């Protein structure tokens, strides 16, 4: 049983240049575990609060004053760690200690325990795992919305999923190939394209929403793949960011059009049909379970996925399950707060046969823990970008995990 013997904390910077909290946990005076809490640009209102009073420095100082409460705990005991955090913060959104602390402390502890026990991180999280189900990498290759600047699409992410790939190496290669091809495709229609990218490394061209979808489809074809069967497209609408609550409309401000709720549902359905989308995230705003259910019912071959709708919250996944509001669920640990919360959310998803997509955030670090979390939770996909050191770190770790799994004869693709 590895014991926490020391804890160190600091402020560092994430991929957007914003301050982020990083925590080191030492087990048995020897084994270092480290985790840095990420942050999102498109944030659901039901998410855990990252910082006390939205102040990173205040959060750091508060944690310093109470970190001795965690010394001596079993670093592999996720439930015990969670209960110790809850003993000092019983709020429903970690506003007293900060969600960043809950995230970094629990993940760093498991990281430390993994090294102490000489066991892969994913196996410390899920000791009963006898096989490795590899998640398909879902790559964001064209972006807009909150992840990019004016002139880009209102829709936040256009993604690709290489479902015909026979290995993780092939899957990562395909996503990279299409990302590169998309640059050439955009160049052909925009001679002044500056190669601008959004927060997650996706190209951010000056095009409208429908044109963006067409460009992605064309790039898939140019790379020699069938976009309806071999490399299927996905879209993250991030609809809460374009929903005007007062006027009850979806305001595609950059395109200069608005849609009623019925029009939004039909627009989403048309994109799913026309492009045979494998994935549609947050197609309506974060409180609209009813229309999510309509889209889900009409799209049995597409993972209609809740992110802002669910915010990695077990209570909200239960509501979604009762209303049959989605077939997929985004898992972002920092939305939930602690890793224990996120694992409970994953358990509830699996019990309701809602497929899990483990996801990065737009403000990331080079940590690769979510690759292991995806394995531990039997996620069918992982959203972690295509390029950029903070994105590649997760993909490279999946390559290492898949190599180990194949050597052991126990790795296989998840079933989408």
Image: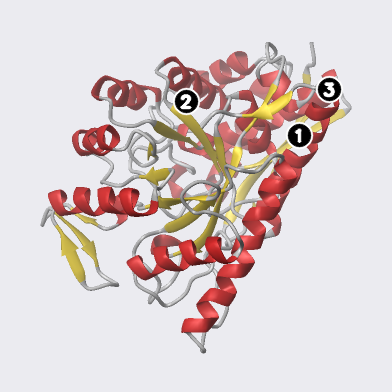
Tell me: 123 left or right of 219.
Answer: right
Q: Which one is in front in this view, the residue at disc 2 or the one at disc 1?
A: 1
Give the class, few, some or many, for how many residues have Cα within 10 Å of label 3's Cα (few <14, many ≥20): few
**In this rendering, does residue 13 appear at all?**
no
Alpha carbon of mark 2 to alpha carbon of mark 1: how far?
Answer: 38 Å
Assign the N terminus to one quadrant of the image. Answer: top right
**In this rendering, does residue 285 appear at all?**
yes
- Residue 280 coordinates in the image, percent (x, y): 38, 45
Alpha carbon of mark 1 to alpha carbon of mark 3: how far?
Answer: 10 Å
Q: Nearer the viewer, residue 239 or 34?
A: 239
Q: Residue furthest right?
A: 30
Q: According to the image, label 2 marks what residue?
A: 89
Tell me: 104 left or right of 215.
Answer: right
Report the residue at 33% width, 27% height from top.
316
Q: According to the image, label 3 marks what residue?
A: 408
Q: Are marks 2 and 3 in contact (CB under 8 Å)?
A: no
Q: Nearer the viewer, residue 279 or 240?
A: 279
- Which SS class for mark 2? loop
The answer to which of marks 2 and 1 sits earlier in the sequence is 2
Q: According to the image, label 1 marks what residue?
A: 402
Q: Quadrant of residue 380?
A: top right
- Residue 215 coordinates in the image, percent (x, y): 46, 68
Q: Residue furthest bottom?
A: 191
Q: Quadrant of residue 292?
A: top left
- Which SS class for mark 1? helix
Give the class, few, some or many, for how many residues have Cα within 10 Å of label 2's Cα (few <14, many ≥20): some
Q: Nearer the viewer, residue 90 or 239?
A: 239
């Amino acid at each position: 049983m590895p014991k926490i013997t020391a804890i160190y904390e600091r402020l560092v910077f994430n991929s957007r240049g914003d301050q982020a909290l990083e925590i080191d946990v030492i087990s048995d005076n020897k084994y270092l575990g480290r985790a840095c809490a990420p942050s999102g640009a498109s944030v659901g209102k039901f998410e855990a609060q990252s910082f006390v009073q939205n102040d990173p420095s205040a959060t750091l100082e508060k944690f310093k004053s109470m970190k001795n409460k965690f010394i001596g705990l079993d670093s592999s005991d996720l439930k015990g760690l969670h209960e110790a955090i809850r003993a000092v913060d019983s709020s429903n959104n970690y506003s007293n200690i900060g969600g960043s602390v809950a995230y970094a402390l629990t993940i760093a502890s498991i990281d430390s325990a993994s090294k102490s026990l000489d066991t892969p991180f994913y196996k410390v999280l899920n000791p009963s795992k006898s096989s490795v189900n590899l998640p398909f990498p879902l790559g964001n290759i064209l972006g807009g919305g909150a992840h990019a600047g004016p002139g880009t699409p209102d829709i936040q992410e256009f993604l690709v999923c290489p479902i015909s790939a026979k290995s993780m190496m092939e899957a990562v290669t395909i996503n990279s190939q299409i990302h590169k091809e998309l640059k050439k495709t955009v160049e052909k229609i925009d001679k002044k394209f500056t190669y601008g990218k959004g927060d997650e490394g996706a190209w951010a061209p000056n095009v409208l929403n429908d044109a963006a979808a067409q460009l992605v489809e064309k790039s898939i074809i140019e790379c020699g793949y069938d976009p309806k069967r071999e490399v299927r497209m996905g879209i993250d609408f991030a609809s809460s960011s374009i929903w005007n609550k007062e006027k009850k409309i979806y305001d595609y401000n950059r395109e200069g059009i608005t849609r009623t709720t019925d029009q939004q549902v039909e627009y989403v359905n048309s994109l799913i049909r026309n492009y045979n989308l494998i994935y549609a995230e947050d197609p309506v705003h974060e409180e609209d379970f009813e229309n999510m259910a309509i889209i889900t019912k009409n799209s049995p071959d597409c993972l209609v996925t809740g992110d802002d709708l669910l915010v990695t919250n077990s209570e909200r996944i239960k509501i979604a399950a009762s209303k049959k509001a989605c077939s997929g669920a985004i898992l972002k640990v920092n939305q939930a707060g602690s890793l224990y919360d996120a694992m409970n959310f994953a358990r509830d998803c699996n019990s309701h046969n809602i497929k899990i997509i483990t996801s990065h955030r737009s403000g990331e670090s080079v940590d690769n823990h979510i690759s292991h979390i995806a394995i531990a939770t039997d996620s069918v996909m992982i959203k972690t970008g295509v390029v950029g050191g903070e994105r590649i770190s997760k993909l490279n770790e999946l390559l290492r995990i898949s190599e180990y799994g194949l050597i052991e004869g126990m790795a296989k693709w998840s079933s989408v």
